[in-house]
Image (spheres, rainbow, N blue to C red):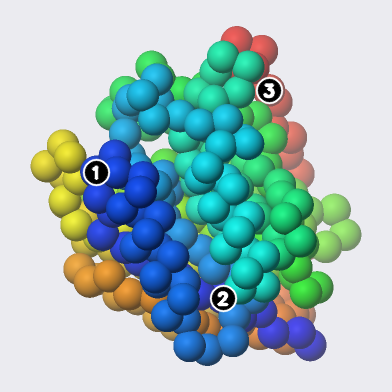
Amino acid sequence: MSQLLVTLIQANLQWEDKAANLKMLEEQIQHIVQPTQLVVLPEMFSTGFSMQPEKLAEPMEGPSVQWMRSMATKHKIILTGSLIIEEAGQYFNRLIWMLPNGSHGHYDKRHRFAFAGEDQHYSNGNKRLIASVNGWKVNLQICYDLRFPVWARQQTTDLPEYDLLIYVANWPERRSHAWKSLLIARAIENQCYVIGVNRVGEDGKGINHSGDSMVIDPLGQVLFTKAQESCNHTIALNKSIVEEVRSKFPFWKDADPFQILQNNADA
């Protein structure tokens, strides 16, 4: 069965300084010494978790997306992380899935963090993105989405929808217990690998982030975690582990059927 080589980049982001962050992240990507297929950056990796989209947003043709395309093409990787994007007069916290050939998909954050005013500045998305790579299906989500298990739940018919669930985040240290606990829960209940990539350091609002980026297997065992320090870490995920767990413990077959209905007011 196929492997997937994934690199997590846990970084100390400079507040609202795109040039500094892109330069730092480019150096991090260049310093990846092991072969890798997918590189995961934190939420709003070019700015930090800012509520100033009017000042910082870019179109999809803007320099930050072009930077992602350049990095993916140059290093022959898939590169993913979220940015502040403007489209048709609306602002989105948008995760980009950039392929080595320059094509891309995207996911707009569904659950906006009202506690910090994100709902006042950004429009929400209403569609999940499940990408494909090397025989894997990858469900891509952003930070606060982690608190809403239905949005990530495998919508099974004959087989589970995806094999890997990724969260990119700017998750504060003071709620790190919830971050770690919920990532493990998502792995167990969906019988998949889960990766959470968070930032470290203090942001422009004085909020500290401890990182605690994690890789978790389908049984909920933590394979990697790192706190308080910037790092990049490459790990090999094995599809055979996913298949074995689902075969030995076919709990997914007993899941309750459900549908997610779109609220037109949120469209």
For marks 3 and 2, give the one nearer the viewer: 2
Q: 226 or 72, which is in the foreground? A: 72
Q: Position of residue 15 (x, y in %)?
A: 24, 43
Amino acid type of the residue that numbered disc 3 sits on in the rendered structure: Gln
Closer to the chain start, of discs 3 and 1, is: 1
Mark 2 vs 1: CB contact within 8 A: no
Mark positioned earlier in the residue sequence (2 or 1): 2
Rounded to the nearest angstrom, the CA distance separating label 2 from label 1 is 26 Å
Of all residues, the one furthest to the left in this rendering is 206
Q: Label 3, on which residue?
A: 262
The x, y position of residue 211, in whole percent, is 28, 63
Instruction: Report helix, strand or loop for mark 3.
Output: loop
Quarter of the figure that contains the N terminus = bottom right
Helix, strand or loop under label 2: strand
- What's the residue type where badge 1 is placed? Trp
Mark yes or no: residue 200 visible.
yes
Q: Residue at x 75, y 68 (%)?
A: 133
Q: In this rendering, would 212 be left or right of 235?
A: left
- Rendered image: mark on residue 15: 1
Which of 70/34 is in front?
70
Label 2 sits on residue: 6
When the figure is inspected, residue 236 is found, relative to residue 69, above or below; the finding is: below
